[in-house]
Structure formats: C-alpha cells, structure tokens
Amino acid sequence: MRSIDQHREQFVQTTISGRVLVTRVSGSWTPEMHRAADEYNQDFVTRLNETGNWASLVIIEDTLVSCLEVLQAGRESIPNNPNCTRLKALAWIIDESIEGYTILLPRYRSLFDGVLRSEVFNDIESGLNWLDLCLSQGS
C-alpha cells in the first residue's frame, strides 16, 4: 500500500485486490489533491488495464464534502484516461455516519451516470460482491 501526504494529511491509500483497485480516501478534497491522486494511481490503473477487465472500490473514510470541481474532475477522469478502457464498474463505500451523507449522497449515486456503471454501498463486502458480479458479466 502506498500513501500520499500533503499538508500533514494522508488523503489516499491504494491497493490492488485481484481485479479490483481499492482506494481509501479521506479529507475534503481540492482539485490539486485530485490531480495528485490521479497521478499516484496511474501505475495501478495501467497494470490493471493491461491484464483485462477491472473494477474500482472507493472507500470514503470521513467526509463527502469537497468542491464541485473535484466531483466533475472525477467524472471526467474516466473517459479521458486511456488506461481506463477496461474499467467496468465502480462501487462507492459510504457509511451513513460519513459527513455530508444526507446532503451529498444523491450526487455520488449519480456521479458516473452515462459514463460508468456505479453503485453506493454501506459496507465493503456488499461493494466487492457487486463488483465481482459486474466483472463476471463482463459489463
């Protein structure tokens, strides 16, 4: 597992589990943090894309609050990244206790509409099960 530190705050941790990119994120993100995380994850994404279809599990650890530019950048990063051509699905793991859950959950549920198959789950096991199903269906 690798981590990025910026201004004393660890905001992303990434691992690969089988055909799933697992990313834990924390903090209120800025566009600069999003760009840094994208750069940081490129090696993982490239490796997964070279091996076939893959999926992404994003675990929100503490808050959904960030600027709208960050959400838009996330949405645009998938179709604009040539290393995401085999990315088939993304599962958000967002517990009800996460800051901004009630207000921002609908935005996260629809963030990738028309771009990528995605769902929101309360627990990691449910998210991984859904991703396994997506990958087994090839969609």
Image (spheres, helix red, strand yellow):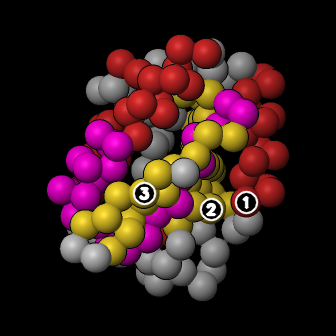
Q: CA–CA distance between discs 2 and 1?
A: 6 Å
Indicate the position of residue 57 as horizontal and vertical percent values.
60, 48
Q: Establish if 105 lies above or below 86.
A: below
Label 3 sits on residue:
3
Label 2 sits on residue:
93
Q: Residues within 10 Å of mark 3 (few under 14, many from 20)?
A: some
Q: Residue at x 25, y 58 (%)?
A: 33
Which residue is more in the foreground, 124 or 118? 124
- Residue type at tag 3: Ser
Indicate the position of residue 104 as horizontal and vertical percent values.
43, 72
Which residue is more in the foreground, 69 or 54? 54
Please tell me which of labels 2 and 3 falls first in the chain.
3
Please tell me which of labels 2 and 1 falls first in the chain.
2
Q: CA–CA distance between discs 1 and 3?
A: 20 Å
Q: Residue at x 73, y 27 (%)?
A: 135
- Residue type at tag 1: Ile
The residue segment tinted magenta is 18-40
Q: Residue at x 44, y 77 (%)?
A: 63
> Label 3's element?
strand
Label 1 sits on residue:
124
Please tell me which of labels 1 and 3 falls first in the chain.
3
